[in-house]
Amino acid sequence: MTDLVRPEGKLPNNDDPEDHSILSRMARFRTNPFNFAHEISLFVRGVGWRGYNNVIGQPAFYPGYTANVKSAVMASPILRRRIIELTEARLKVEEKEYLLGTDTSTYMKEKEKRRHEITSQLIEITSDMVDNMMCKMESKPYLRTAFYVVTQLLTRAYSAIHVSEAEVKRLREIATEAAKKKQSIIFLPRHTSHIDYVTLHLVCYRLGLTLPVVVAGDNLNFPLVGSFLQSVGAMWIRRSFDHDQLYTTLVQAYLDTLLQKGYNLECFIEGTRSRTGKLLQPRFGILSFLLDSVLSGRTEDAYICPVSLQYDKVIEVDSYVSELLGKPKEKENLAAFLSSSKVLSLNLGRVDCRFHEPWSLKDFIEGQQRREDGPLQLSAGSTDAKTRTRLLRTLGYKVLADINTASVIMPTALVGTILLTLRGRGVGKSELIRRVDWLCARTRANGGKVADFHGMPTSYVVERALEVLGPKLVGTVEGLAEETYYAVDRFQLSFYRNMTIHLFISEALLAAALYTQVKQGGGSANQRVAESELTRKVTFLSQLFRGEFIFPAGHGLRHNLDKALQGLLRDNVLQATESGGERWIGLSDAERKLGRENFDFYCFLIWPFVDAGWLGAVSLLLLVPPLASTTPWIDMQKAQSTAQLVGRTLYHQGDLSYFEAINKESLKNAYTRFQEEGIILVAKGKDSKTPTMVRLAPDWTPERDPNTGELRASGRLWDFIEAIALYRREGKNRRDGAAVSVRVLSLTAKLNEQMFQDVEGAAVDSAEVKVKEGRRRSRL
């Protein structure tokens, strides 16, 4: 396996670490014209791996590939049945509307003629949709040229792509086995950047695997770029199917065909790029098609391969921050693509691509049938929607957990995390190195991986990370006795901090729960919490953040809590004492002597999200209808943008500690949780053009004074806001005695009045709105 990842001409070294670079910067004409010409010659002649010959997997990139796959799709039984169903449905409509004369002597003949016309039209429409959708991998010389050009461009920004030799060897072995069975490997990577599409393709090309067909949104199908991507493996699907039965069946038929023929697939389980740096909740659209293909028996089996793609620095982070602050996402187009090419001249560090061990989708389904905690009754003809949904959710969260398991923590994430979890304005270089060392040790202790730098000292890794992050994110204070660094753009740095938080989420929840007592002050006896009370508080937080984080899978909250608590006790961050027949948890004496630096680290990880949850709850006060209002419904987008305005105002007035708490994604997650718990009612439109409306549930709506119209400080919503506020970091100019201060209340009252005045003219009758209410008693 070593020869696969060894640079050209390098002898094997048995002492090489597991991490290897498989692609590095190519020669430039201006700096080394001879090597530049030599590399071009190697690609033109297809020497070694560059020729992309004898690949592992089913053959692709040959003349006639597109026609062969298209004919198989058009002959798909499920697609043919759907066309017949739609034809018959249309005939019934025409009969009902008297477009076909049922009382004439030529009725049957005209009906048959009309049936043929409708079927022909549907087949023609389907054929056009297939042409627009499917990838067209026809030419291997074209692929080799594309690989060379894209590698030249990508390695101008990123120094190398690294993989694990052990993971690559295992992947090739499973790919060989799958190829013999004519079965597909479904790559499911995390989605951080548009570069993800390119990175995984380059890795598969370099390793001699059949390139996967990439399921991509048609927003990237713009002139020139769209056809180029389609020629190297992209298939385009609509961002929304809008209940189009023919299109939905066509997507299923195309994916069935690829899986039946054993072609590899790649799709992003999060559905969109993560703007926050951490994994998003799974999207089940494409995953449901893949699951149904195996569950129905149309495909015998396929291998699932979760993939983690990590970058020292992500190209799009600047635009992510703008979007999170409420700026509309810019539509992809050729001009934007060309203008963004300037970033390819930047130093963005390196890329790490890690593969989790692939596993059989069929074995996963059978394993769910044997579950001890309630086996799923599955069969090829099963139509139980509830059972399928449960299976799909289990599959989605298992993939996300596997991605987190495979992930490595990059140097920029280490440095960004430390800078955002220290008290004070800045940090000296020696202290920064010491804390990065500590974080590396904690990462490995929690089962995580740190990017391998072949034995280089931590000081080198830190300097390299600071260089990649640059002065716009991390500043340096000149003229001091020691090099001192500080966070310039905390919002952007939070993107890199969020790449580590999944490893410490249980510890962070424990720290935040204990902090509710620690911030009361006093001696150690006054700053401890009974273990039962600590568990109750952590349970509340875990329910609040259920849609925000991907928690460790497979064991449940109690197991994860016990494991994290034992780790904190073992690390001497916390200590347990027995008193009055109760076990009490508090800070250890050693941690107090250290100035709470480790305890504070875990608190600083979670506090921005606590602030975001609190802001989301406070923003619900905006939804309380004024006394004279004729409608309780508000446009969801309007409500969330007003909530961001509240957050910006509160941050600059000192009532919100973290500016990143106003980000759009956290507010969306909060509103989703509130909907699940029945705190708010949401009415979705009939189509994508109709706005989604929101209102407070009646039993969560605070009362107003009938004379003044002011909100009364009582009720479930008030208690909920106060409950979240207990876990917030106490600021210099703020105390938590009254979570909703006079300033906060007056601000929300002012914006509440303005918002309802704006929507009075477009009121929605609640009797006509179909609402998805909470299905169970709220755990919050």
Image (spheres, rainbow, N blue to C red):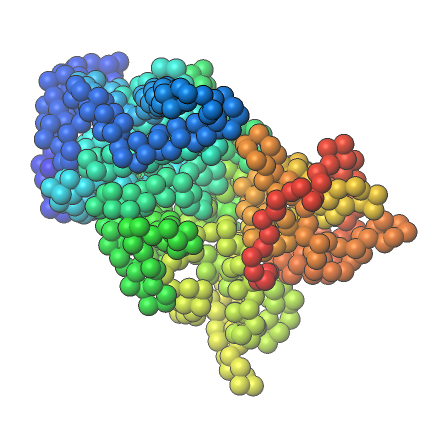
Residue at the limit of the structure toward the front, as seen here: 105
Residue at 61% from the left image edge and 44% from the top image edge: 770
Nearer-the-camera pick, 315 or 404: 404
Residue at the limit of the structure toward the right, as seen here: 707
Q: Quadrant of the C terminus?
A: bottom right
Measured from the top left, where is residue 112 in percent x and y? Answer: 35, 23
Nearer-the-camera pick, 230 or 146: 230
Residue at 56% from the left image edge and 72% from the top image edge: 533
- Determine the image quadrant of residue 530: bottom right
- Determine the image quadrant of residue 373: bottom left
Can residue 307 be seen here?
Answer: no
Q: Is residue 724 left or right of residue 163?
A: right
Residue at 16% from the left image edge and 43% from the top image edge: 178
Nearer-the-camera pick, 257 or 381: 381
Q: Is residue 260 left or right of residue 252?
A: left
Looking at the image, residue 691 lies above or below residue 173: above
Measured from the top left, where is residue 505 in percent x and y? Answer: 46, 56
